[in-house]
Image (cartoon, rainbow, N blue to C red):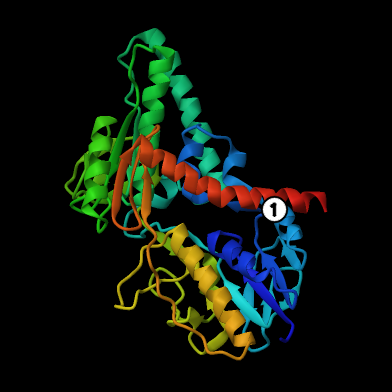
């Protein structure tokens, strides 16, 4: 089998999984490129911003991880261009040739331009710096709120607004409400000062998901005291209040927007076909059309199932795509044809604040409550522990 060089752009869920499945082949050299020196496990960010874990819980050191595999080189730079004619990836300081390329540079929060002020006045959590900024400002505001109790309980409302009731929005809203409830309970503070509002344009939270998950999540959100506003579209955002399409105003201290994702800015400079949100268009093999040596996976793409139906972007989807691309690369090196990507959902687990969750397991098994919370934690453990172990090996090399 011939020796080749594979370049992976992006150290997220898809990029890491692709690397794991290719790095054990001695005839394959790999270069992983990421602008950050860490793998950010964004699917667990709700625990971090709710102060249940520290920052290291959602990070894995990429240089150490790559060293543990031997023939994997890590480049901590931002990719600025891809020259597909020359099979080269271009960074600000170097040009890196490739035989196969996997683009897995992820996504960013999508801020619709038609919502005036949204980008300027809301937080995102799709990066460590933005999540850390929100966490620190939130805790400072809690302290300020307690200090104002010297004037009695008649103080300014402290509202947290979550825009978008998809998976991320629901998990963050639940965890923030649970954290605020625990904070006021533990300190025996007399003035209840935090209200969480979950605002969504659809008629139900978790739109398009299984009815069991929708009902379980809704009941939990209401129990946590969260204000769930359906069929409400945000039309404008100011420094400390939002305006809905019905003219209603709502003051807020913080707003997190989770109403959608757009592909990373890299796609704007590649010359490949994209959709309106910048996601790369791929064929059934996860190749860029007419580019048999270039693959794209994860949130940077818009994945469709065999019926042409959109597959919601998740860490699980990115990992399955990474595994499939690795198999197809190995097949082509053996002279075999590629196989089309077919996604089989292995279940969904949702964190719903505190030690509570809901989920669907393979076989249609439904779980909720503490058991679902334990299962979700076990899934994270089985994902992160091997990476931390490998990273510790690489650190000693």
> For the N terminus, which image quadrant?
bottom right
Left or right of 328 on screen, residue 85: right
**Residue at 27% from the left image edge and 42% from the top image edge:** 217
Circle 1 residues within 10 Å: few <14, some 14–19, many ≥20: some
Q: Secondary structure at mark 1?
A: helix
Q: x, y (%) of residue 126?
A: 49, 51
Q: x, y (%) of residue 33?
A: 67, 65
Q: x, y (%) of residue 225?
A: 26, 30
Instruction: Examine the rendering and report whether any part of residue 282 can be seen.
Output: yes
Residue 19, placed above or below residue 374: below
Instruction: Examine the rendering and report whether any part of residue 125 can be seen.
Output: no
Left or right of 156 on screen, residue 87: right
> For the C terminus, which image quadrant?
bottom right
* Front residue (pair 202, 375): 375
Q: Which residue is mark 1?
A: 390
**Residue at 36% from the left image edge and 24% from the top image edge:** 181
Q: Quadrant of residue 30?
A: bottom right
Q: x, y (%) of residue 231?
A: 18, 50
Residue 352, placed above or below residue 395: above
Q: How many numbered badges does the structure rendering display?
A: 1
């Amino acid at each position: 089998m011939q020796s080749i060089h594979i370049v992976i752009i992006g150290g997220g869920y898809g990029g890491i999984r692709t690397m794991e499945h290719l790095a054990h082949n001695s005839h394959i050299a790999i270069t992983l490129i990421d602008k950050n020196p860490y793998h950010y496990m964004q699917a667990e960010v709700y625990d971090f911003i709710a102060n249940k874990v520290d920052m290291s819980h959602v990070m894995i050191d990429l240089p150490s991880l790559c060293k543990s595999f031997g023939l994997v080189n890590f480049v901590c730079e931002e990719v600025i261009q891809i020259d597909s004619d020359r099979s080269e990836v271009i960074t600000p300081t170097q040009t890196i040739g490739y035989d196969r390329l996997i683009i897995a540079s992820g996504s960013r929060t999508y801020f619709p331009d038609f919502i005036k002020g949204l980008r300027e006045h809301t937080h995102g959590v799709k990066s460590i710096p933005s999540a850390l900024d929100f966490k620190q400002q939130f805790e400072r505001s809690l302290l300020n709120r307690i200090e104002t109790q010297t004037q009695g309980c008649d103080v300014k409302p402290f509202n947290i607004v979550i825009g978008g009731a998809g998976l991320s929005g629901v998990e963050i809203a639940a965890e923030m409400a649970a954290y605020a409830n625990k904070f006021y309970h533990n300190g025996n503070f007399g003035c209840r000062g935090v209200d969480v509002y979950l605002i969504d344009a659809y008629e139900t939270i978790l739109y398009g998901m299984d009815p069991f998950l929708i009902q379980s999540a809704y009941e939990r959100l209401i129990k946590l005291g969260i204000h769930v506003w359906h069929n409400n579209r945000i039309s404008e955002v100011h420094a400390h209040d939002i305006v809905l399409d019905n003219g209603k105003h709502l003051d807020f201290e913080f707003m997190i927007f989770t109403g959608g994702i757009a592909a990373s800015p890299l796609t704007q400079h590649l010359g490949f076909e994209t959709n309106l949100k910048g996601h790369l268009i791929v064929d059934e093999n996860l190749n860029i059309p007419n580019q048999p040596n270039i693959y794209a996976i994860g949130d940077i793409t818009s994945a469709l199932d065999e019926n042409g139906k959109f597959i919601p972007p998740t860490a699980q989807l990115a990992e399955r795509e990474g595994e499939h691309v690795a198999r197809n690369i190995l097949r082509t090196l053996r002279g075999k044809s590629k196989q089309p990507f077919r996604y089989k959902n292995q279940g969904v687990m949702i964190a719903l604040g505190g030690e509570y969750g809901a989920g669907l397991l393979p076989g249609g098994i439904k779980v909720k409550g503490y058991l679902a919370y334990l299962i979700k934690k076990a899934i994270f453990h089985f994902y992160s522990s091997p990476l931390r172990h490998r990273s510790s090996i690489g650190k000693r090399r």
